[in-house]
Amino acid sequence: MERGLALVLPLFLGLLQQGRGGPLEVEPHEPVVVVAMGGSMQLTCRLSCAGRKAASVQWRGLDTSLGAVQSGPGSSVLSVRNASLSTAGTRICVGSCGNLTFQQTVKLLVFAFPDQLTVSPVALVAGLDQEVACTAHNVTPTDPDAFSLSLLLGDWELEGVQALGRAEEEEPQEGEDMLFRVTERWLLPPLGTPAPSTLHCQATMRLPGLQLSHRQPIPVLHSLTSQEPPVTTSLEATLEQGSTHSPRSPGKPGNSSTGPCLPEIHQLPVPGGLELLCEVACGPGVAVRWTQAPGDLAAYERREAGARAWLSVLWATCNPEGWFQCRLDPGGQMASLYLVPEICSPPTSGALWTGSLLLGLLLLAFLTYRLWKCCWARQLLGHPPPLGPN
């Protein structure tokens, strides 16, 4: 009796194990399957029954975005086309052989990770403490375990930098998908000697069975070699560079069918200073705005009109050295201009001359008054003023 139970019990346990999903096969085999936003994929579920039993297989989902399902004897294929964020979720394959039912679950994860990185400033200057920001556009998910931004020297993270924090903002989208703009900021100490020629901002997406990365170079200026000044003023332009950008995503406006829409900064001499013009030659629906200037941006006079934005730099005082930067919306592409005050005229020279002249006139008037008063007093006392030595 005991020997018979010992033979039957393993067989019974084996049937239970099969009932929990043993012979049901799902491809891909991973419990979590990732697909890029806008991409396509297939999930195939198969079941073979012993003997002449017909296998029944069917994909099921927990929501209405199951996808296209084609089922036949012993198999069911779930096709996902043009994946969106609403496509993500748990999918269940249920199969049966007679009275035995089997089940497998697959979690579908949709991600967005376009090669759209921007950096600010667009170039670094050796020997200075500098703040640098790196921004990834239109990404999801943004969980730190899945998405990260880092500053690299070669293939290694740059040492000695101070992390200043991370910010996430929603990117404007036409559909229901919610994508994000993620910015990481660091404070860099003066780069060593010799300074590297280039640093890189790297964005990395790590998901089950998948790791992707994009890089954006940040050149390092070893010396500030000034160009010819646009006008005889106290500032000279040392670097003007178009936006650091990546190829634009489909549907974004551009100034050609193959290239991205890039803002540019031009220098326009005006009486008493310099006017900077940021403009972009794109289709309608785009705008540029100034986002950075030495000191406080609010201290500068600015005018913004769609695809053009002006900023006035006056020579009344020695302006601080640094980057002027403008940004394109939508798209996030940026352009930057670095200005260095090489010749700073004393701002009060004219006022000092005027003040000195006024002080001299006041002193002359005071002496004239004192001399007149002295002569008048002598006449009243009957003592004519001395005429000089005999």
Image (tube, rainbow, N blue to C red):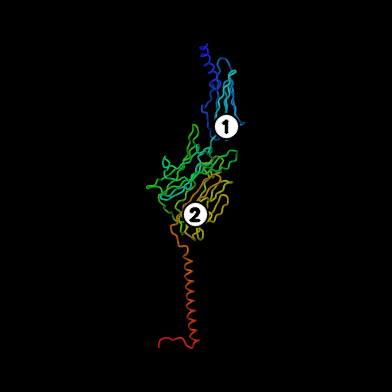
- The amino acid type, in three-letter code, at marker 1 is Gly
**Residue 371: x percent and y percent?**
47, 81
Name the residue beneath numbered marker 1.
Answer: 89
In the displayed structure, 307 sits above or below 45; it is below
Q: Residue beneath label 2, please? A: 295
Q: How many marks?
A: 2
- The image shows residue 79 at horizontal and vertical percentages of 57, 29
Residue 129 in sight: yes
Indicate the amino acid at tag 2.
Gly
Which percent across, then down, holds residue 318? 47, 59
**Disc with the residue nearer the chain's start (2 vs 1):** 1
- Secondary element at tag 2: loop
Under tag 1, what secondary structure?
A: strand
Whether residue 244 is visible, yes or no, is no
Please report contact status of discs 2 and 1: CB closer than 8 Å, yes or no: no
* Residue at left offset 56%, top offset 54%: 303
Above or below, comparing residue 205 to residue 376 in the picture? above
